[in-house]
Amino acid sequence: MYIIAGLGNPEKKYEGTRHNAGFEAADELRDMFKLKLCENKFNAVCSSFFAEGREGREKVLLMKPLTYMNRSGDSIKAAADYYKVPNENIIILYDDINFPVGRLRIRPQGSAGGHNGIKSIIGRLGSEDFPRVRIGVGGLSENEDMISHVLGHFSPEDTAVMRESYKAAAEAALTIIKEGCEAAMNRFNGMSITKA
């Protein structure tokens, strides 16, 4: 079994912000598999589906934690413990300001890199060894502070690029399940979605 968790903040005012890129990518999977996400005991909205894996069909729990970004690990740890999902089968989708809009970066493990959601997950799982799909949302502009940036919205031009990035991030997560993290890295790490 796998968990795919998209990170974000649950209130309506956060919809479409850079920090909710993980939620948006999770919604791509929701739409792809025609799922209905319902709130459950893990303090998340979730739904299960089956995806093609390396050894046949794999059950996947798609999650959007409702714990707010800085406590994402609480929800993910609860689900992982309940279903006995190993860390290497927990795939996290999240925003990254270190990459330009339209760039993805897949990694099998790593540090939090200053991202509070990932820091929370590492703290709760007690490990950095879980795959992640980092979704580039662009860096700070001159005189812009971090909070304003990550809670800000994309320009109309960048919004169009991000829609494609969310689809690619969803495909990358499925590729990790089907072919492994290295195959996903080879396919998606060099990809850069550009403005039309």
Image (cartoon, rainbow, N blue to C red):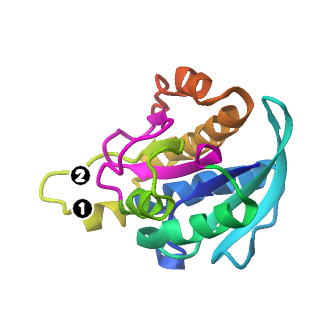
- Horizontal side, residue 106 vs residue 172: left or right: left
Q: Is residue 182 above or below residue 169?
A: above
Q: What secondary structure is marked by label 2?
A: loop
**Does residue 102 belong to the magenta stretch?**
yes
Residue 10's place in the image compared with 62, above or below, is: below
Residue pictured at 48% horizontal, 27% vertical = 189
Residue at figure coordinates x 27%, y 67% from the top left: 148
Q: Kindly tell me whether residue 120 is visible in this rendering.
A: yes
Q: SS class of the residue under badge 1?
A: helix
Residue 127 lies within the magenta run? no
Cα distance in 3D space between marks 2 and 1: 7 Å
Which numbered dot is residue 90?
A: none
Nearer-the-camera pick, 48 or 95: 48
- Residue in the picture at 50% in, 35% down: 106
Q: Position of residue 54 (x, y in %)?
A: 78, 29
Reading the image, the residue beneath label 2 is: 140
So how many labels did they put on this image? 2
Q: As rendered, which of 140 and 159 lies closer to the eye? A: 140
Q: Which residue is mark 1?
A: 146
Give whichever of discs 2 and 1 has the lower sequence position: 2
Which residues fall within the magenta stretch? 87-115
Q: Position of residue 194 (x, y in %)?
A: 46, 31
| The quadrant where residue 147 appears | bottom left
- Of the pair 53 and 141, the residue shown nearer to us: 53
Number of residues whose C-alpha sits closer than 10 Å to that of mark 2, classed few (under 14), some (14–19) or many (20 or more):
some
Q: Amino acid at mark 2?
A: Leu
Does the CB distance between marks 2 and 1 fall below 8 Å?
yes
